[in-house]
Image (cartoon, coloured by chain):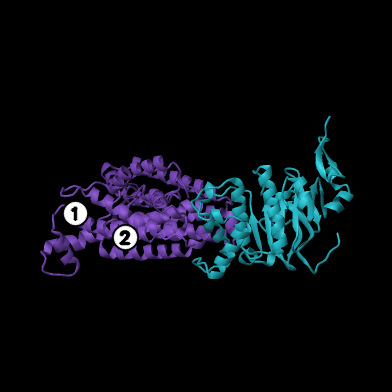
Chain colours: A cyan, B purple
């Protein structure tokens, strides 16, 4: 890990994440030192329950770190107010949206809330940002539909558009492809890759689509038991980092194919 | 969040509200020609004096009370449904009306237990509103203190329901030890009543109501972001905890003052937001807030007109009418539309 602090947008220093408890803190990972640069697509990989969400939650200030610090554009994350942070960091979460009658346009327009006045009037600039977000995610035809009428894949695109409308340097997505079929999954991932190239935003995405993530991401945060590794796909492969991702021999990492294959027995 | 224009619906509903208001003040046990009603309202002194008294001191205050109660409860219901993102929430889920009931119950029923102290005060017609407000305020404080200790908003819903059960239980105990006449007096209060308010009381009512509505306008933005859930709202820069307390406070003030002056009026707060959502097919609070105000006022005016049993001497309890006519409407709407939204 060579650090280039000039360009780094998100940095952690000796970060320990987990859940504080009365007797002894429940620590998930400790001593995390990440330096994430602008304009990167970064995948967070790891098996179920390893702590992907905990890491993401800590990075976006939903959860407090146990020790250590997170720096966002060189400033400590704690010093950001909720409103300041909402202009820097946007989210796409896994949780289901409450059932409402919001239209796709209204939902995306909510992304402009950090910038609008007390009564939430959309200025011309706001409308332009919304239009751009709709164009970038290619959902113009859905604009006037209610969001509950959409398919899962369409909804993910809308949620990504909402995050884009929020106009932040960093977007964090928690398992955006969880309920999607193969086609939609590839669709979303290539959209993310495209967005990083077009907009120079940093996108951090947690996923179970390991093979796809390895192909399309610039860098990987790999979570295995008590171990967090960060680097480009090649550097992690060179370190044999993927061998320990899954416990038994059912799945094996094939170095030459650069992906996981099922072991035939 | 503009785009679609809702002007046509709003104009239609406003006209409806005015018509209903006119119908409401035209009906009563005494038949007064509409022309004379108009003349009275415009300050013409040539109308028969007894008619003037009826209109200015009975019908007009009652119609205004109906508007304040109907719209206030509907706004409170909208706030609760959005805050809890639960279509079953209403203004009474926080146990506030139970608190108000407890206050009144202590005043009426407690007098036999605690002797003459309460009785001496129950002469003034302010004593009911004051007792109800104190009761509502105490329960509200308890709910807000409890709300700040739990992380999950849904727990507040349960806590509110528990406070409701607790106060109801206390009222039952009080009623058990009370005399028939006092129980009857309490029962009559719990039927709800839009009449009996003097202009002074209406003035106090109106000031508190306007404060509540203005505060609601100020939280439209957080309300809209809450439609995405608390985590998204937070990521949009909304201070969820602060706004949650503000929303709880507004709801409590509105329901507290309404219950204090008009008794616990059921159904309106739960149903009107749903009717508004079905008419406007929107969840945007910029549309819904004016919509529930107009609709809530209209619906309570209708219920009040029915409860007067036009041309008869009797007046049915308003609380029974709201449920009797409202519940079937909501059931019908639901069966037709099949889905409830927040």
State whether residue B256 appears in this view: no
Q: Is residue B50 above or below residue A207?
A: below
Residue at position x 44%, y 57% in the image: B251
Identify the image quadrant of residue B172.
Answer: top left
Specify few, some or many for label 2: CA neighbours under 10 Å numbering under 14, 14-19, or 20 or more: some
Residue A59 location, x and y as percent?
A: 71, 58
Q: Is residue B73 above or below residue B179?
A: below
With B188 as the anchor, is A125 left or right in this view? right
Circle 1/circle 2 CB separation < 8 Å: no
Q: Is residue B105 above or below residue B204?
A: above
Residue B37 location, x and y as percent?
A: 16, 62
Element at badge 2? helix
Q: Are marks 1 and 2 on the same chain?
A: yes
- Which of the pair B174/A195 is nearer the observer? A195
What chain is tagged by disc 1?
B
Residue A188 location, x and y as percent?
A: 67, 51
Rendered-image quadrant of the N terminus of chain A: bottom right
Return the residue at label 1. B27
Residue at position x 22%, y 59% in the image: B22
Specify few, some or many for label 1: CA neighbours under 10 Å numbering under 14, 14-19, or 20 or more: many
What chain is tagged by disc 2?
B
- Which of the pair A206/A138 is nearer the observer? A138
- Which of the pair B233/B104 is nearer the observer? B233
Element at badge 1? loop
Q: CA distance from mark 1 to mark 2?
A: 20 Å
- Which of the pair B185/B73 is nearer the observer? B73
Return the residue at label 2. B14
């Amino acid at each position: 890990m060579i650090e280039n602090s000039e360009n780094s947008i998100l940095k952690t220093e000796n970060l320990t994440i987990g859940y504080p408890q009365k007797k002894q803190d429940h620590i998930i990972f400790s001593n995390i030192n990440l330096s994430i640069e602008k304009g990167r697509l970064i995948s967070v990989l790891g098996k179920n329950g390893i702590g992907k969400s905990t890491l993401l939650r800590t990075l976006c200030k939903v959860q407090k770190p146990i020790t250590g610090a997170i720096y966002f554009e060189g400033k400590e994350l704690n010093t950001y107010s909720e409103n300041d942070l909402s202009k820097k960091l946007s989210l796409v979460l896994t949780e289901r949206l409450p059932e409402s009658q919001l239209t796709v346009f209204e939902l995306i327009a909510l992304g402009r809330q950090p910038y609008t006045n007390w009564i939430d009037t959309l200025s011309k600039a706001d409308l332009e940002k919304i239009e751009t977000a709709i164009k970038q995610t290619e959902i113009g035809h859905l604009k006037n539909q209610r969001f509950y009428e959409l398919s899962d894949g369409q909804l993910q695109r809308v949620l990504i558009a909402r995050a884009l409308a929020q106009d932040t340097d960093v977007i964090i997505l928690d398992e955006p492809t969880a309920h999607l079929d193969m086609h939609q999954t590839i669709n979303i991932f290539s959209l993310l890759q495209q967005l990083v190239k077009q907009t120079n935003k940093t996108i951090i995405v947690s996923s179970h689509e390991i093979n796809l993530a390895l192909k399309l991401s610039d860098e990987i945060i790999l979570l295995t038991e008590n171990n967090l590794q960060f680097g480009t796909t090649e550097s992690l492969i060179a370190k044999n980092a993927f061998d320990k991702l899954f416990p038994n021999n059912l799945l094996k990492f094939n170095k030459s194919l650069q992906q996981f294959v099922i072991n035939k027995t | 969040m503009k785009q679609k224009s809702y002007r046509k619906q709003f104009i239609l509903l406003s006209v409806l509200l005015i018509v209903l208001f006119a119908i409401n003040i035209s009906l009563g046990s005494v038949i007064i020609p509409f022309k004379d009603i108009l003349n009275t309202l415009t300050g013409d002194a040539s109308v028969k004096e007894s008619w003037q008294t009826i209109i200015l001191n009975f019908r007009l205050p009652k119609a205004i009370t109906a508007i304040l109660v109907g719209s206030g409860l509907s706004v409170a219901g909208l706030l609760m449904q959005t805050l809890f993102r639960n279509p079953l929430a209403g203004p009474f889920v926080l146990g506030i009306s139970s608190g108000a009931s407890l206050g009144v119950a202590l005043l009426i029923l407690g007098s036999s237990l605690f002797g003459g102290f309460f009785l001496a005060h129950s002469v003034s017609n302010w004593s009911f509103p004051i007792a109800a407000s104190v009761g509502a305020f105490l329960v509200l404080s308890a709910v807000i203190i409890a709300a700040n200790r739990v992380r999950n908003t849904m727990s507040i819903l349960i806590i509110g329901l528990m406070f409701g059960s607790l106060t109801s239980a206390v009222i039952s105990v009080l009623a058990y030890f009370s005399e028939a006449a006092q129980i009857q007096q309490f029962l009559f209060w719990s039927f709800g009543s839009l009449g009996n308010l003097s202009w002074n009381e209406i003035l106090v009512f109106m000031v508190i109501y306007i404060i509540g509505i203005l505060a609601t306008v100020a939280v439209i933005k957080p309300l809209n972001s809450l439609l995405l859930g608390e985590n998204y709202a937070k990521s949009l820069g909304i201070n969820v905890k602060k706004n949650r307390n503000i929303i709880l406070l507004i709801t409590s003030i509105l329901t507290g003052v309404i219950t204090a002056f008009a008794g616990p009026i059921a159904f309106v707060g739960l149903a009107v937001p749903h009717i508004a959502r079905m008419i406007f097919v929107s969840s945007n609070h910029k549309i819904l807030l004016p919509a529930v105000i107009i609709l809530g006022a209209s619906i309570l005016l209708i219920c009040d007109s029915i409860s007067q049993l036009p041309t008869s001497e009797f007046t049915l309890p308003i609380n029974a009418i709201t449920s009797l006519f409202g519940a079937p409407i909501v059931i019908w709407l639901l069966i037709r539309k099949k889905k409830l939204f927040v």
